[in-house]
Image: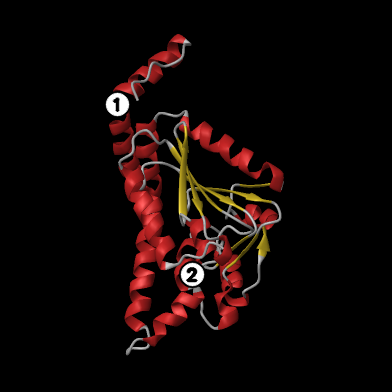
Amino acid sequence: MTILERNDTGAVAHLTMNAPDRLNALSDEMIAALQAEFDALRDDSDVRAVVISGAGKAFCAGHDLKQMTAGRQSEDGGRAYFADLFNRCTAMMLSIRSLPQPVIAQVHGIATAAGCQLVATCDLAVAADDTRFGVNGVNIGLFCSTPMVALSRNIPRKQAFEMLTTGQFIEAPRAEELGLINRSVPADRLAHETTELANLLATKLGSAVTIGKRAFYEQLEQPLEQAYAYCGDVMVQNMMIRDTEEGIAAFIDKRKPDWAQ
């Protein structure tokens, strides 16, 4: 059984975490498989959008606690293993942000701890309306500090802190209200709605979306005036693309653009 399945439909790559017996936990193997696919997608100009989903009854239940417990058997009590694990997981999460393509989480069942972090890290997220989200590590004495980084950059800080300190779950409609996901939909519409969104993204000029995605995250970290100066430069860069020139001309001429990409 392949722990991560990839199926491309047109310009959309669908990645399915396939460890349903472990609720698609972010084991060492799952992190490595995701990292390998992200590395491959970075240079795949045929792919315009990426969808990540989970097989079985859950999207992702976070880190593999049994594997983490086994890591304690080393002489240092697991310190080196844990440091390496969280570094590898962080690198994998950051790869999503640096991908040229928009990445959509297709979420069902539960998304907990690092699984909730994965949802928060993706550029977009669509969830079945009965999905539950939590950063519930505090319930077993492990504060979700690395998931906190992505979560607190998605939802208001007081709501994030409440989730982190109480370990309580929120359901998809509330997650949508807070901004953790883009929309909650009936479970039987989840795949369709996610695919529709991915296909819409795939119709856009790839070079423009790539430039825009990078600029979106860069400007968020900058003061207002610096962000405007930076994004002005990005606009100039975008305007110099041949297909952008063609897109503007086609709009003026009221015709479909003849994009090379």
Q: Is residue 49 visible?
A: yes
The residue located at (36%, 56%) in the rendering is 35
Name the one closer to the observer, 230 or 48.
Answer: 48
Q: Is residue 189 left or right of residue 100?
A: right
Amino acid, disc 1: Ile
Is residue 83 placed above or below 251 in the rendered structure? below
Which image quarter is the C terminus in?
top left
Q: Please identify the quarter of the rendering in which residue 211 is found.
A: top left
Label 1 SS: loop
N-term-proximal mark, 2 vs 1: 2
64 with respect to 84 (left or right) = right
Residue 199 percent location from the top left of the image: 52, 33
Q: Is residue 100 above or below residue 205?
A: below
* Residue tagged 1: 241
Residue 159: mark in rendering: none
Which kind of residue does numbered mark 2 sit on? Answer: His
Residue at 47%, 65% (x, y): give it. 26
CA gap, disc 2 and disc 1 = 42 Å
Instruction: Point out the frontmost of discs 2 and 1.
Output: 2
Q: Secondary structure at mark 2?
A: loop
| Residue 95: image location, x then y, percent | 36, 54
Quadrant of the rendered image containing residue 242 = top left
* Image vertical order of residue 3 relative to residue 106, above or below: below
Query: Which residue, given by chain and number where applicable, does mark 2 sit on?
Result: 63
Residue 83 picture quarter = bottom left
Above/below status of 100 relative to 239: below
Asked whether residue 225 appears in the rendered view, the answer is no
How far from the left and from the top, in percent, is residue 182?
Answer: 59, 47
Residue located 62% across and 74% down the image: 167
Residue at (29% x, 31% y) in the render: 236
